[in-house]
Every structure is written in structure tokens, then in C-alpha cells.
Image: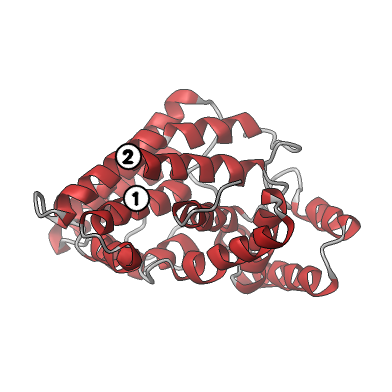
Amino acid sequence: MKDIAACAQLACVLEASAPKPGNVNRCHDFRDTKYEHFLASGIAIGRFAESAASRGYEAGKGKISISDIGIGRLIRDAVLETKRWHGGRNTNLGIAMLLIPLSAACGISLARFKNEDVRDSLDAVIKKSTHEDSLFLYEAIRAAKPGGLGKIRKLDVNDKSSDKEIIREKLNLYDIFKFSKDSVALELITKMRISFEIGYPNIIEAYSKKKDINAAILSAFLEILSRVPDSLIARKNGIKAAQEISQEAKAILETGTDAEGLEKFDRKLRDKNNRLNPGTTADLVASSLMIALLNGLRI
């Protein structure tokens, strides 16, 4: 279980450190959120990933039910713990939403000696979650205050009456995520399709060629961004703007990732208000990295 947690922590730290256009990294800070904030959050998530893995293992052994793993509470607690260690803005809500269920799924599969079934275990973790998990997730979102949250018609996280509807209808995480257009939510109802089928293989292939983890992370970041419009950009600017950024990422991949082109792309994404920050793509890179590390990637 400690190795699963270490993979989660290392994935967070490596993702934050790589020079990804438009994101905080070791060369660039945002005005209100800095590189060290991301490092702190990457470490802070560790014990909750370990708890998720341990409880997943207990579920895999039949000692508790999958519904009793409590991933909603663990996500909430990871976010609150993160806020205890730094004063920046949201750094790991999306990452916690991805890595904690993934950790639980790894624990289940480890208990059953079927590591190849991690995606099926993940599917079970989400589908067998409870409405209490959904309520804890809403607490986590309210605590993290992620950027770009607008008002929506159904189950608006900023409308406290949504909690009553979740309780009345007993809406679990799968039910909640079905209403969302966010890539992290969609990832969790598709067995992490992007992470497993796009990000992870890209990291492995790129790293095998250059033995450069930063280059591999950048490659996966651009590949995901080119194929999946960033939902944080979409929330802040509309889907058309997100699609245009994806097309630019695709053009960079097609023409080659030269330093001048990447620097120009980075400058465009890095405005003073961070409205073009591809933050959701960064979250998906973190989960892709964790999968790679779980499968033996060593830097």
C-alpha cells in the first residue's frame, strides 16, 4: 500500500515539475499559486492514497464492501489536508478525484491477484459509491474553490439545495459524474480512458526513446491536450476557445516540439489571469504518470 501511495506522490511531484505550457512548474509561478504549493499538495495526498489502497485491499479480500471504502471522504480529507500545508489556491482537487479512486482500485486488484483488472475495479469503486461519497465530494469542491465554476441548472455545487437532492435521490458519484462535462468526471465513468489509453502509453513510449521524464511528460501533455479540449479552459472561456487551444497543441505535435514554438505557446496560455491555463490536462497527466509508475516506470 505504501508503494501505491508513493506512486501517487511521485506522479504529483513529477507532473508539477515538468515544463508544461501554461501551467505552474519549476520555472514559472502564478501570482497566487506557486510551484512549492504544488509540491506540498503532492506530498499531502500520500496518506489518503495509502488509506484508499488499504481499504480497497480490504474490499478485495471481502472484509468490507466496495461501498464502504469511502472515497468521497478521502478526497475531501485530502483537499482539506492540502489547505493545511499551503496558502495558494486549488492545486489538487482534480488530482485527488483521480488518484484516490485509482489507489482504491489498485488495492482491490492487488487483493484479488488480478492487477490487469484495475480498470474494472475502478469502475466498481465509482459505480458502488454512495450518496455520502457525493456529499463529501461536494464539500471538497467547495473547500478547493476551483476556477471557472459557473452556475448550472442541475446539482449546482454552489447551491446547498443540491445536497438535499443528492440525499433524496441517493445519487452516488457515478450519478453525479454523468451530469458533468468536466474531463475528470468523464474520466471516472469511462474507466480512465484518457489516462490508460492516451497518456500512459505516450509516457512509456516517449521515455523509452529519450530517457527524459520531463520530455515524456510534455509529450503526454500535448497529446492529451491535442485530443481532449481542456475543460478548465472551456469553463472559463467557452468550448470554442478550448478547441482552438487543442488545435494549436496538435499543430505543435505535427511540426515538432521545438523550443521556440513551445515558448510562444506557453506565452499565449500564460496571461495574468490564467484564463487559458490547461489545468484539467495537467490532472490527466498526473493520473497517466501514476499508472506508468505503478506499471514499473522508474526515472
Q: Nearer the viewer, residue 141 or 223?
A: 223
x then y, percent, for residue 101: 33, 53
Q: Quadrant of the N terminus?
A: top left
Query: Earlier along the polypeptide chain: callout 2 or callout 1?
Result: 2
Q: Is residue 149 visible?
A: no
**Residue 233, percent across and down?**
62, 59
Q: According to the image, what is the colour scheme of the structure? A: secondary structure
Bin the neighbour count of mark 2 within 10 Å (Cα to Cα): few under 14, some 14-19, many 20 and up.
many
Left/right placement of residue 192 relative to residue 275 reads: left
Residue 10 visible somewhere in the drawing? yes
Tag 2 residue: 50
Residue 254 appears left or right of 125: right
Give amino acid for label 2.
Glu
What amino acid type should be assigned to the residue bearing mark 1? Ser
Rendered image: mark on residue 103: 1
Q: Quadrant of residue 224?
A: bottom right
Q: Position of residue 280 (x, y in %)?
A: 55, 56
Name the residue at 32% across, 54% down.
Answer: 106
| Label 2 close to label 1 by CB (< 8 Å) | yes
**Which residue is drawn at the image coordinates 27% and 55% (left, top)?**
110
Q: Nearer the viewer, residue 256 or 292?
A: 292
